[in-house]
Amino acid sequence: MQPSLGQRLIAYTIFFILGVLVLVPLAAGVITAFKPRIIWVSSPPTWIFSPTLENFEFVLIQRNNLLHLRNSLIIASGSVTIALILGVPAAYALARFRFRGSKGLLQWLISLRMIPPIVVALPFYILFQTFDLRNTHIGMMMAYLTFLIPLVIWMMRGYFAEIPSAMEECAMVEGYSRLGALRKVVLPVVLPGIIATALLNFMFAWNEYFLALILGGRDTSTLPAAAATYVGRAQVEWGNLFAINLIIMTPVIILTLILRRQLVKGLSLGAVD
Amino acid sequence: MALPIKTQPPSATRQSQFRIWFYHWSQKNIHWFFIAPALIAILVVAIYPIVYSTGLSFFRVSFDSRERPFVLFENFIWILNDKDYWGALGNTLLYVAVTVSGSFVVGFGLALLLRRISVGRNWIRLVLILPLTIAPIVVGLTWNWMFDPLFGLVNWFFIGIGVQPQTWLAQTGTARIVVMLVDIWQWYPLVFLIMDAGLSSLPKAPYESARLEGASDWMIFTRITLPLLRAVILVALLLRTVDAFRTFDLVRVMTDGGPAQTTETLSLYLYRTAFNFNKLSRAGAGATIMLIVISIISNFMFRFLYREQEGR
């Protein structure tokens, strides 16, 4: 049954309003990042001006955010790589073998996602001092693994389960060992899944703030932690702040465009796909 | 899938007997070789910290002293007697109730609405899920600026329709509402994504026969759509509840708990206790209580969920 013209009109109106509510704040922020300093806080807001890159130059070079950008990249890509190396084999085993406790293990893994970060952050803070991991990228990556590993296992298990196990069996009849079959036959097929998992996890690690705030040292502080230091001052440097915001937002929006379909699976813990 | 394994007839030496035994054992338990690295890593980075944090709450720990005397329940008693703790708990419960139901209604509503149209669906989907992917910290900072009393766009909009400019984030009446609205703005896309996927996977047959029987839209929704989507709805609610319960980023940059602690959530309170007031172990006790509460809630919802999935 086709909805009537009136119904469709109402639907499009609602979507239009929602679209405005979503896009206007984001667009206004992006525009502010390109405003010259004198009109950052002009009131009423100025919308016609010659765009400048001076805010970006200022935050990246004068304010040393190039370092934070580097930290964000190192910590996010490093922790995701480790999570994949550890998580992908486990996901394969959980998708392929039925053994005693496999179901319980899976449920336990999702429940790890429910841990409030403060529960992990407090002991990490103290343990970092004990093991001299303060101000190191390795320490930050370890903290990020607490939420990345369960997520990798959950997403990858879904991708492995979609591949018929007959594929490996054939390869094994042809004389491959299990590991050989896994490397030569299964991994190429599941590669798009691995890429999607990597990108989504990168997004989570990239956006992370709480652990970065508590555990980040002088040389390991990430971009979100740096952005947050801009508020709460007497005079907020809005143009500079939005320049950092835009740097944080850009890769994530690009990833969203690439990942649209995989996003649901990752975010709903594989419950829906 | 086990393939017949041809082994040499067992020779008499003990060593090769052990080898054969080991070979069979490793074939039977091969899954553990795949799982063990991840499991060990999780034990180190998740379980050990949790146990440590729980243990911490029975000692007196602070940054300025090396001594850590055992104090049993002192930290728990202290935190349960702190009225700020109960205030933060109340705020958090209100926050969870409002933002979870708000994002659920908006997200589910939009997912249902999207079924009614055909042109431009993919573009609408893309725009609608944008807030979810942006870092909460960026969302908070952006809206902080939108609600600025002097030059924020929100006030310019309200001046346009004849309302006096307000200091939205500095008044006890409005700060709470604004923060919760922004939270809904950020998280409705999660519900939308999950429900949209759930609606796409529904079978067609029950709908066709219901239409033939002349059922109304409302009846179809309550009698067919809702029951079929029960498990999906539970997943969405579970994820939202757990996330809302531990909200930190958004509140931290928008109000930092103020004004008059009306927006102070549990995470914020524990952070303040540990790092501003230097009471690590009291925060540890609070975190332990929070962990227990979250486990109870999620366990309860999981039970429900699995019974739901097995019933089908």
Image (cartoon, coloured by chain):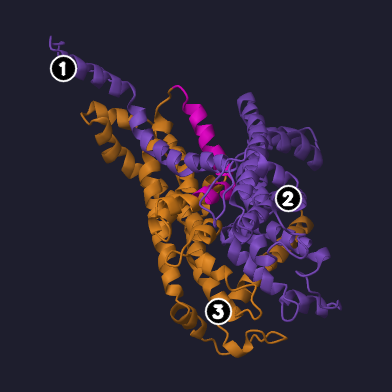
- Picture coordinates of residue B243, whole percent (x, y): 63, 49
Q: What residue is pinned by disc 1?
A: B15
In purple, which chain? B
Instruction: Name the residue tied to disc 2.
Output: B85
Q: Position of residue B212 (x, y in %)?
A: 75, 34
Q: Chain in orange?
A: A
Give the residue type at disc 3: Asn
Helix, strand or loop at label 1? It is: helix
> What number of labels is visible?
3
Mark 3–mark 2 distance (CA, rounded to whole Å): 36 Å
For this rendering, which residue is in front, A22 or B23?
B23
* Chain at tag 1: B
The residue under the point 28% across, 40% down is A183
Image quadrant where residue B304 sits: top right
Query: Which residue has dot 3 on it?
Result: A240
Q: Residues within 10 Å of mark 1 (few under 14, many from 20)?
A: few
Q: Nearer the viewer, mark 1 or mark 2?
A: 2
Relative to B150, is A192 above or below? above
**Which contiguous range is marked in magenta?**
A100-124
Dots 3, 1 in contact, CB < 8 A: no
Labels 3 and 2 touching (C-beta < 8 A): no
| Nearer the camera: disc 3 or disc 2 | 2
The type of residue carrying mark 1 is Gln
Q: Is residue A109 magenta?
A: yes
Q: Is residue B85 visible?
A: yes
Nearest-to-viewer mark from 3 and 1: 1
